[in-house]
Image (cartoon, helix red, strand yellow):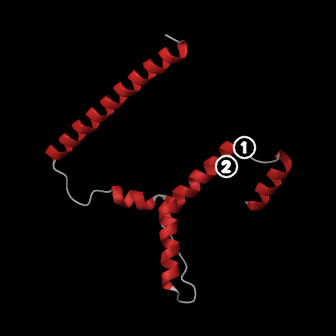
């Protein structure tokens, strides 16, 4: 497979950015499927834990773990949270609309 890839690269030059992005997405999905693996060298567990922490923060797995609810959320709580999120979204959209109108007036010199 690598031989075919190298041959194609020599014929067509560098692959396009979309192909590189697609392969990066596939690699990230594969990494999430496999999990994070760290080698412990010379029995140095502290160093391996440090590497694992760096990899977890860079891959976003730490955020995924923290975002997972640790307890059951009742339906009434879900409704309250959904209403609060909707109100926050509407408020931010209104603010964005007001700021846009102010900027348009300022640019047009009105």
Mark 2, other Cα within 10 Å: few <14 / some 14–19 / many ≥20: few
**Residue most toward the top?**
110
Residue 34 vs residue 49, the one in the foreground: 49
Above or below, 46 relative to 73: below
The residue that label 2 is drawn on is 20
| Relative to 60, 93 lies left or right | left
**Residue most toward the bottom?**
42
For the residues labelled 1 and 2, the Cα–Cα distance comes to 7 Å
Instruction: Point out residue 35 in the picture as x, y percentages from the top left corner.
Output: 48, 66
Label 1 with label 2: CB-CB less than 8 Å: yes
| Relative to 15, 30 lies left or right | left
At mark 1, the secondary structure is loop
Instruction: Point out residue 104 in the picture as x, y percentages from the top left corner.
Output: 49, 17
Above or below, 3 relative to 49: above
At mark 2, the secondary structure is helix
**Residue most toward the right?**
11
x 41%, y 57%: residue: 63
x 79%, y 60%: residue: 3
The residue that label 1 is drawn on is 16
| Relative to 7, 88 lies left or right | left
x 57%, y 85%: residue: 41
Instruction: Point out residue 55 in the picture as x, y percentages from the top left corner.
Output: 52, 66
Above or below, 67 relative to 100: below
Total numbered circles: 2
């Amino acid at each position: 497979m690598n031989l075919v890839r190298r041959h194609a690269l020599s014929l067509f030059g560098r692959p396009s950015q979309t192909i590189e992005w697609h392969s990066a997405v596939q690699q990230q999905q594969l990494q999430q499927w496999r999990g994070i693996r760290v080698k412990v060298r010379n029995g140095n567990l502290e160093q391996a834990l440090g590497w694992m922490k760096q990899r977890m923060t860079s891959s976003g797995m730490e955020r995924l773990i923290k975002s997972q609810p640790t307890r059951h959320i009742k339906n009434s709580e879900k409704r309250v949270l959904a209403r609060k999120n909707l109100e926050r979204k509407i408020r931010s959209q209104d603010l964005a609309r007001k700021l846009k109108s102010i900027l348009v007036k300022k640019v047009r010199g009105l």
